[in-house]
Each structure stands twice: as C-alpha cells, then as structure tokens.
Image (cartoon, rainbow, N blue to C red):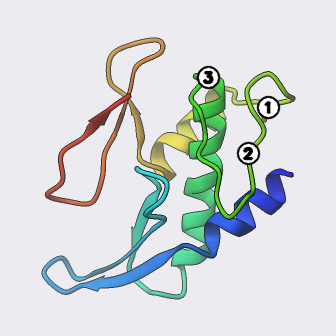
Amino acid sequence: MLTAYIQAAMRHATYEWLPEDGIHYAAIPELPGVWTSGATREELPSMLQAALEGWIALGLSLHHSIPVIDGQAAPDSSQSAPRCDRAGLDRAHSTSSWHNAGGVGSATLIRKRGQQPVQT
C-alpha cells in the first residue's frame, strides 16, 4: 500500500531548472511541501522520493491526513506507521520541507523560494 502510494505520487513529480539560483528543482504539486533541489537533474528523483518518505512519516506521526493520489491512499496513523525516531526526524527535516516551527503538533511547510510557509 505504501509502495503503491509512493509510486503514484512520484508520477506527479515536476522538474525544473532555476537559472537564477543555478539549481534543479523537483516537487510533487499535489503534496504541498514535498520538494527538493540539487546540482543535477539526475539526482532529483531519489532525493524527491526521500523527501516524500520523510514527509509521509512525519505527517503520520503528527496525525495529519495524507491526500489520496490517483486513487491510492497512504496508510493512516491508526495503521502501522513507519517508525520515526530522532534520526528519522533529522533525515525528514533535512530532505523534506517539514520543519518543526512551534513545538509538538505544529509544523510549517516551507515551499519553493518566494512562497509563503503554510501553517498546519
């Protein structure tokens, strides 16, 4: 179920070159806050998948709803969610756009440069 969800989400990935920053950028527009950037286009799919996995793990641990994509639902937090220990949180923090902004239960989604954060 989780693998099918990740595969469906990755089919929605968008990629672009940001010449003003000199970087490549990837995002999944249907999942606010799931994005990454890198020096080469080739590295983006694996980096984006890692960001997506961290986003899902953190979202489930905070009991956020995860949007359905192409009929695929992510497991909800009442099911067996991926364990998100301190190392996992650090990885999710560095590879996805979830950032702890206000303590337990509060997170801010930081989007592409120039966009406003979305409080959840």
Q: Position of residue 32 (x, y in %)?
A: 41, 51
Q: Quadrant of residue 76?
A: top right
Of pointers 2 and 3, the one earlier in the residue sequence: 3
Q: Quadrant of residue 107?
A: top left
Q: Is residue 102 left or right of residue 10?
A: left
Whether the residues at callouts 1 and 3 have beta carbons within 8 Å, the answer is: no
Q: CA distance from mark 1 to mark 3?
A: 10 Å
Name the residue: 62% across, 58% down: 50
15 and 90: which one is in front? 15
Name the residue: 46% across, 87% down: 41
Q: Position of residue 53 (x, y in %)?
A: 65, 51
Q: What amino acid does circle 3 point to?
A: His
Foreground mark, 1 or 3, reads: 3
Task: Reply above or below: 85 against 68.
Answer: above
Of pointers 1 and 2, the one earlier in the residue sequence: 2
Q: Which residue is mark 1?
A: 81
Q: What amino acid does circle 1 point to?
A: Ala
Foreground mark, 1 or 2, reads: 2
Q: Is residue 39 left or right of residue 66?
A: left
Of pointers 1 and 3, the one earlier in the residue sequence: 3
Q: Position of residue 8 (x, y in %)?
A: 70, 67
Question: How many residues crowd around disc 3 within 10 Å: few (fewer than 14), some, or many (20 or more)?
Answer: few
Q: Which residue is mark 3?
A: 63
Q: CA distance from mark 1 to mark 2?
A: 10 Å
88 and 8: which one is in front? 8
Q: What amino acid does circle 2 point to?
A: Ala
Q: CA distance from mark 2 to mark 3?
A: 12 Å
- Per the rendering, the mark at residue 102 is none
Q: Which residue is mark 2?
A: 74
